[in-house]
Each structure stands twice: as C-alpha cells, then as structure tokens.
Amino acid sequence: MNFEEHAAKPLLAAAGIAVPAGRLATTPEAAAEAAAAIGAVVVKAQVPIGKRGKAGGIRLAKDPEETRQAAEAILGMSIGAHTVERLLIEAQASIATEFYAAVLNDPGSKGPLVMFSSVGGMDIEEIAAERPDALRRHAVDVRGGFSLDDARSMLEGLDLGAHEEQIATTLEALYRAYAENDAELLEINPLALLDDGRIVALDCKLVLDDSSIKRQTELSQRGTPERPSDLEAKGQSLGLKYIDLDGEIGVLANGAGLTMTTMDVITHHGGRPANFLEIGGDAYTKATPALELVLSNPNVKSLVVNFCGAFARTDVMTEGVIDALETLEPAVPVFFSVHGTGAAEARVMLRERLGIAPYPDMDAAIVAAIEAAGGPA
Amino acid sequence: MIVRGNERLLVQGITGKQGSFWTQRMQEYGTRVVGGVNPKKAGIQHCGVPVYASSKDAMREGGFDVSVLFIPPLGAKAAALDAIEAGCKKLVILTEHIPVHDVMHVLAAARESGARVVGPNTAGLVTPGEAFVGFMPAFETDIFTPGRIGVISRSGSLGTLICLNLVQAGFGESAFIGIGGDPILGTTSRDALETLDEDVGTDAVVIVGEIGGAMEEAAAEYAASMQKPVVSFIAGAASPLGKKMGHAGAIVMGDKGTYRSKRAALEQAGARVLDTPSDVGKVVAEMLQ
C-alpha cells in the first residue's frame, strides 16, 4: 500500500526527523490561507507516485496570491493515472546539499537494507549508475536492528564533516520508523542539509507491506487505497483478486502462476485476455461468484476455464462453474482445460451435466476460445 | 531441499482442517509423519500421531527432521522460531501473507542456526515415489512419477501443470521444489538450482519462474556454469505493469522484474525459455539428446 507524502511525513516527525512546516489543502483558497500562515511555500501535488516535479506538480510560490494560482493550476492535473485532489503547502527551504536515505525489504540479503547517498535529489537508480562512490548500503539483521554505531560506520569516508553525527541520528530514526510501521520501503529523497545547518526531510515515500495491513490497521487508514474499477471492486468484496484487462477472452484459473500463464498463452496464440482472476488458495470454493464476475464484463466473447489442481480441488471448482453456467445460461462459449487434484471427477461432471469433454491441454482450449471470439488479432 | 522418504516430518498446525486433510494425504503417500504441534491440544493423538505443545517437546520426546507449517499468517513467526530453536534444520512454510518483517526475522534466525527454510507461500516439496510435504497432488500419477527431471517453481498450480506435461511426454520427476510466491524467500531459484545440479538423480532442470524480483536472473548466472540442461517458463509476459498478479512477489516496478530481463538472462546462460508450458516435454527431450 502506497502513501502520499503528507501521510508519510508524520511518521518521520514521530521518529524525531525534522520535516518542513506544512498543511494539506484541497482548494486554492485553503492553499492561500496556508501560505498566509507559513510564508514562502512549495505547492506539491499529493499523488502516490514519483516524478511529480517533472509532471509539473510542484511549484514555488512567494505569497498567498501566487500560492492560490499555483494551486489552481495543479489541482485536477493528471499525473500518471492519478488526478490531483490534494496539495501539501510546505515552507520553502534554502538547501545547501541534498542527500538520499532509505530503508527497504531486500530480497537479496533477505533482510532490511539501509541505503544512504551523499548525493540526492535524483532516483536511486541514477545515483547507483552515476555516483556509486557516493552510495552506501548496510544489510541489517532485523533481530538486532540498526544502531547509531551502525549508522556511523556506514557513513565513514563520505566526507560529511560536522554533519555526520546528525545524519547518523537521522538514519537510526529512519530505521526505527521503518521497523515500527512494517514498511516495505521508507525513503527520504532528498534529505537536505539547509543553509542554517539543519537536516530536514524534504520528501518522503512510504510503502506499507500489504501482508502487514492487518496488524497496522490505524496506519493503513492513512494510505492511498488502489482505485479499483467497478468489477475489481466487486471482486474485492467477494474476496477475489480480479484485474481488468482490455481483451475479449475471459479467464478463470486457479493460482496466480497458472492464471498469469493463461493470459500469456492467450497472447502467444494471438488473442487478448479480458481479465486476471484467480481462485487459488482458500478461494477455490468461490467458482460460482467468480464466473459471474468474469461474465459480467460485456467485452468477453469467449471464456477459458483453466484448472490445474494442487491445493485447489478441480472437482469443487468445476462443480461451482457448472452451477454458475446452469444458472446464468451465458451466451458466450466456455472452453475447459482441467488437470490435477480431482480432475477425473471433474471430467465426469462435465460430461454428465454439460455433455462436454475438456480439451486435452490448455493450448487447445485457448486456441478454440480465440477462434470462437473471432480469431487471432 | 529435496525431501527424502526416510526423513521424519513434524506438522505444526496438524489439528486444523487443512493440516488434518493434508497430513492424511502425506501419510497415505508414505511421508514419515511422526507428530504434530498444537499448544492447546498437547497429549492427544491426531491422524495416528502424538500432538505436542511445541516443536521443542516434539524434538525432545521423539525427534524429527523436517517441519511443515500449516499456521495462519500472524502465528507463523512464533511457530517457525519454535521449530528453529528446537534444532530443526529444514522448515517448509506454506503460509501466504506472513508480514515480511516477520519473514526476515525467521530467515535471520534460520541462517544463524544453519536451518534451511523453503517458502513462505509455497505449495511444498515432492519426491515422487518417496515422500511429499505440503499440499501438492503428489498422489496423482499422471502428474508425479519417479524420474530424472528436477522442477523448481514459484507457483503451485503452474508447477503442477509443468509436471503433468512432463509426465505426458514420458518423463518423471527426480524432485519438485516449490520455492514460493513471496518477495523474500528462504530458498531462491538459484539455491534450488544448485541443489538439483548436485543431485545425482537429476538429468535436467525446469525452472518455473514469474515476473517480479531478480531470482531468475540470479539463477541464470548459476545456470551458465552447468552441464545439465536448463529449461524455463516465466509467467507474466502479458501482465500489466505495477500490479500485483496474485502473488505478493509477482509485480513489475518500473524496469525491475520484467519478463524480458528474465528471459534474456536465462537465454544468455544457455537455457531454453518456453512460450507455453505445453512445450516443456518436447524441449526437455531435445536438450537431453
């Protein structure tokens, strides 16, 4: 789950990291009021993705009138797939030097990774490519955490002068905020040394581990929920992972890997999948509502049912699909490939109740479904 | 991480619905289940084996070699640490949606004590004709039959399909290693590939990968040094960017974890990458000639 800057920065402040004075505004008037209280400000679009500046979503304003104008220009702007509805009105800072700091879950070391760079303000990928000498990485044993001494040793040789201790303190605090909030990523870019000698987090990105939402209930209220389509929302309410795609071949499969593969093989044979929908894990008993969901997409011209049972029993899933087909009597043709746990029983059911046999393999079922939908593109 | 028929298995969470169902399947197959754990039901017999209050009790009273966890997400860390502290050297964690900070804690403890973790979010391990651990349809003989092809998979369902296709083509499996669909795993594709490369019963390896992360690229580095043929299918070529495709680890962020990168790395290492899982038998046969 992603967080917008205004929702992430309070976590830094709570850990003792300085952030600029700021207020959230949703109208140009409120933005101007905030500027009247703060002074010269930065007007920042609040969307849960990067590159806001390049998209024109960040502007400087020296007084309330300029702030109002900037807010008018930015509110309603599209950045990526997001429409700007909120602004962070923040005090301007006079920056002496920009740094980069982050903590993230690292699959390579199988633990937290603290990263710091004495150059900042650009993407970490750019820093790694252009200034590898400025970048430090420290793999952490999550059981012991990350101490001030760890931070100090990490910063050795970066020539940070009198500010080294303050930066070390910031890194230790950043790690604490990461650990306490079950973050997948907590990043400050830029972390700035100001002309007055203070170290301040000018931006902040937080990604909460989705598997931790259930124990971070309060924090997750402040995250940015994904904006699902109507069908995606319906899937969510049924406990099913459904993703809208723009093709004509409906997909119902079990397990994430097999569902992705069904989409891949449809594409390989010249068709276009209409959706991702898997009923793996405990959801294998939900075949009936799942099929209703796929068929409620008006673009679907044919349907592939691709089951390969491991944990999920294909007889239970197939029975659910047959029940749904008998109730809905859909106009679109359905093409089955059924293998694995329970497949023999599933084949009997298909023969007795629908009078059909499944295709010998998924490719055959998919090719037939593509033909029924009008042939390869 | 190849499970053997002589290894003694402890089932943590044996009394639950899934724990009971799959314990019976494992026993029918020949897996040596020697006990289970449920702190609230210690002292009873379940599925014909004793239930202990903890893994430590199980280790002290009868001993075991491998532990499998049928434990809900928020209880998995404590259960895994219990097994590690008991001296267990091989853990199979089936649970999906364990908080990642908990996973990292378990993996750090495992590393320190020299324990190997498979998973989390895996369907388990199968050694056809010997034993299976987890919830794989090992007992379906058109999917799993003794043979000489090793299979590594991030996905249970897709791994099952690959095994089915191998058997249809006349092959059998030396071992199926389900590594799991999470972003941070105890056993990576590369770890499993090294194991199968060293296994005298394995002639060729199939890597079933998916988009997200950099595991297939790391496995490709190792594959380049191998004599045994490597065949791979990577799921997710047609998946949209920035969306989690069912598995927590299956997401492309920017240019990270793309299908193209994985396919290129494997092909450069001399592996054959399949367009459809249906071709696996044909391509393995070609490479073994």
Image (cartoon, coloured by chain):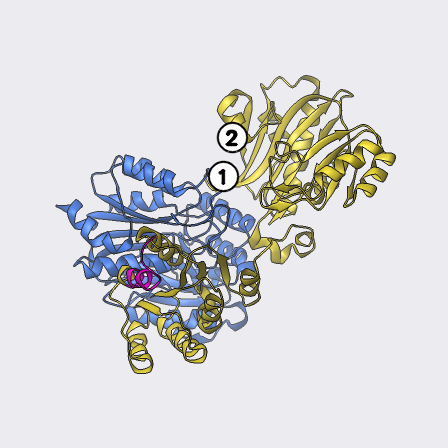
Chain colours: A yellow, B blue
Residue A369 is inside the magenta segment: yes
- The reply to whether residue B12 is visible in this rendering is no
> Badge 2 is on which residue?
A125
The residue wearing badge 1 is B254
Q: Chain of mark 2?
A: A
Q: Label 2 vs label 1: CA separation?
A: 11 Å
Q: Residue at x 39, y 66 (%)?
A: A311
* Residue extent of the magenta highlight: A365-377
Query: Which of pointers 2 and 1 indicates the residue nearer the eye?
Result: 1
Furthest residue toward front: A374
Residue at 68% x, 41% y is A5
User: Does the rendering let one see residue A43?
Assistant: yes
- Residue B220 magenta-drawn? no
In percent of width and height, residue A356 lies at 28, 76
Whether residue A195 is situated above or below residue B133 in the rendered picture: above
What amino acid is at disc 2?
Glu
> How packed is label 2: few (under 14 Cα within 10 Å), some, or many (20 or more)?
few
Tell me: residue A157, above or below residue A272: above
Left or right for B52, reference B1? right
- Occupied quadrant, residue A323: bottom left
Q: Residue at x 22, y 62 (%)?
A: B145
